[in-house]
Image (spheres, rainbow, N blue to C red):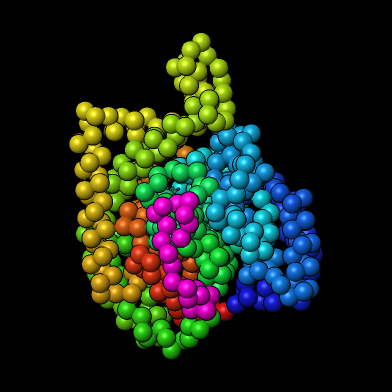
Amino acid sequence: MFTKDLIDNLLSSSVEEHLHKKIEEIKKKDKEINSFITLGIEEAEKKAKEIQKKIDENKQGKLSGLVISIKDNIAVSNLRMTCGSKVLENYIAPYDATVTNLIKKEDGIIIGKCNMDEFACGSDGTSSYFGPTKNPVNLDYVPGGSSSGSAASIAANFSDLSIGSDTGGSIRCPASFCGVYGFKPSYGMVSRYGLSDMAMSLEGPGPFAKDTYGIALLLDVITGKDPRDTVTIERDSSSYLKTVEDFKECDIKNLKIAYAKEFFEGVDEGIKKIILDKIGNLESHGAKIEEVSLPNLKYAISIYYLVVFSEFSSAMSKFDGFKYGHYSGGQDIVEAVSSTRETAMGTEVKRRVLLGTFITMEEVRGKWYTKALKARSVIKDDFKRIFNSYDLLIGPTMPTLPWKIGERISDPLAMYSADILTVSANLAGVCASSQPVGKVKGLPVGLQLHANSLSESKLLKGMRAVEIANGGM
Ligand code: GLN
């Protein structure tokens, strides 16, 4: 296993050397890829020294000097936190997010803050105020979004692990496009304290890695109850890492996996072929695979965007130029707030604030927002029904291959449609993952697995099963 070997090597070689190799790579290649907005090299070097000492005394934490990058909507104290926006161009986080704190405690080295779509609104990594991130697999193509820099930093070998956030696919989409592993935990499994919210009922932070082992390792560190985020849930004390380590080829036959035909409708033929082939591999290893139906999947995008617009417009109300960030000035408060927003927010962010403000107006609330909430519970029920009989739900992560940079930026509906296979996991609050399973025309294809809420262990077993069934690590 890649990440396991890496840790074994770190324990017997030098953490500082490992960090310096990463810094060299970043300096050489990140001007072009643009996966980082801010680097924290000095602090990282200091931390590497400390961890080396701990390793020499055999007192290191679980992450033992792995180099970790963090999406720029998650607070790392004393580092700039921009959310990919001019609004927060000069904002320095005064405290650590809970995930950051947990990573530091377990001796991860935080190397820097990753580029992202502005305020996490996007599916391809091109709407950042700090310029688009490029896909390390092919620089002409998008890396996926909104956690574009997190996925790219793993694919380019700039970091060993990364943290992103997923509101409607922002971990799984870039993981799929960049050919790395991404995991969206169940709602409430990872604290949102220190995450700048986009749509608070849908989202949470989650890990990126090069393999299932890396995902499990980081999940063991970041999951669990946090008194600072009231929706967080106590997790059982069993180790995710051990679940992955102990999983054997013969365990594949104990998995009951559903696949929904709707997940394959309108999907690129090359992607479809690869995913069906992988499902076949699982079946030949003894997994039970059956077809099910998700009849309401066709409504998922409309429901998701109505919920997002509403929650996002409310989340953005704090960025008025007075409490936080960029301030443009004006004759009176109304002019000051509008000119601040006019000059500092990008097109997609403004579009969502305006639409969200409109659909939550008293007069039209029942027409859009209330209906969306009712429809959301129908999607939830569909997932519940499936997980009453199956361990996992399988399909592609994305309906298309990565597109060329700039191709969809002025077509919001085309951009939104890319989320068709990822948003329902967020609407239902279940956990879901993406892992690389092949390439079409030289571009990565991701396989998506879902498991019931709080069934992260099952999901990790599924990821490991796919890894093994494909002859991997
Ligand atoms: N692409 C989706 C959106 O733009 C998902 C974003 C996310 O998960 N943060 O809303």
Q: Which residue is pictured at 31% across the width and 81% down the height?
A: 288
Residue 168 at x, y percent in the picture: 40, 51
Q: Residue furthest bottom?
A: 250
| Residue 242 among those drawn in magenta | yes
The quarter in which the C terminus is drawn is: bottom right
Q: Which residue is pictured at 53% across the width and 29% down the height?
A: 323
Residue 395 at x, y percent in the picture: 36, 66
Q: Is residue 71 visible?
A: no
The quarter in which the N terminus is drawn is: bottom right
Q: Residue furthest front?
A: 227
Q: Which residue is pictured at 49% across the width and 40% down the height?
A: 119
Which stretch appears magenta?
Answer: 225-244
Horizontal side of residue 429 vs 365, given as left or right: right
Residue 14: quadrant of the picture? bottom right
Q: Which residue is pictured at 79% across the width and 73% down the height?
A: 56
Residue 447: quadrant of the picture? bottom left
Horizontal side of residue 274 vs 439, given as left or right: left
User: Between residues 232 and 184, which one lies in front from this camera angle?
Assistant: 232
Horizontal side of residue 209 vs 446, given as left or right: right
User: Between residues 454 and 214, which one lies in front from this camera angle?
Assistant: 454
